[in-house]
Amino acid sequence: MSLPNCPKCGSEYVYEDGILLVCPECAYEWDPAEADADEGLVALDANGNKLADGDTVSLIKDLKVKGAPKDLKQGTRVKNIRIVEGDHNIDCKIDGFGAMKLKSEFVKKL
Ligand SMILES: [Zn+2]
């Protein structure tokens, strides 16, 4: 049987540990069933780069925020994003604004 390469470093020496797959080279562990389920969730930034959970992005334009006293400014850094389903496909926290959702087309990966 063949195991997939490590999604983090591309190593082919992946082995099974119970239900998890483990990479001996970068020590990444993941659940292959979960990885399959996540495949439908793709968020692309303004440049067409694929975004992933934990990425840092910056805004490419000023964005109005409902209920906030000020706009989000172009160039604002957003750390540790989470990709979610829906029209606003980035879940994140922004200093001074709190938790919010953004559209991936309005950010670029840093
Ligand atoms: Zn690896």
Image (cartoon, rainbow, N blue to C red):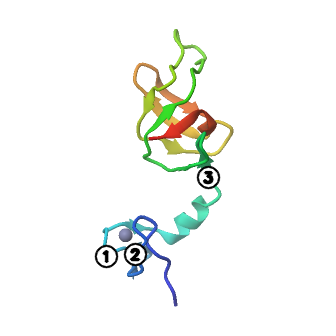
State the residue at coordinates (58%, 59%). 38
Q: Are marks 1 and 3 in contact (CB under 8 Å)?
A: no
12 horizontally vs 27: left or right: right
Residue shown at 40% from the left, 75% from the top: 11
| Mark 3 lies within 8 Å of ligand 1 (Cβ measured) | no
Answer above or below: position of 95 versus 103. above
Element type where label 3 sits in the image? loop
The response on whether ligand 1 sits within 8 Å of label 2 is yes
Frontmost of labels 3 and 2 is 2
**Dot 1: element:** loop
Q: Which image quadrant is residue 101 in?
A: top right
Amino acid type, label 1: Pro
Farthest residue toward the bottom?
Answer: 1
Residue 83 is labelled as none
Q: Which residue is disc 3 drawn over? A: 42
Q: Are marks 1 and 2 in contact (CB under 8 Å)?
A: yes
Question: In the picture provided, is 4 more to the left or to the right than 85?
Answer: left
Kind of residue indicated by mark 3: Val
Q: Which residue is mark 2?
A: 11
Q: Earlier in the sequence, mark 3 or mark 2?
A: 2
Q: Nearer the viewer, residue 103 or 97?
A: 103
Q: Is residue 42 left or right of residue 24?
A: right
Q: Which residue reaches farthest front?
A: 47
As measured in the structure, the alpha-carbon distance from the residue carrying label 1 to the one carrying label 3 is 27 Å
The 10 Å Cα crowd at callout 1, few under 14, some 14 to 19, many 20 or more, is some
Quadrant position of the C terminus in the picture: top left
Identify the residue at image location x=40%, y=24%: 95
Quarter of the rendered image showing ligand 1: bottom left
Q: Which mark is residue 24?
A: 1
Label 2 secondary element: loop
Q: Looking at the image, is mark 1 or mark 3 earlier in the sequence?
A: 1
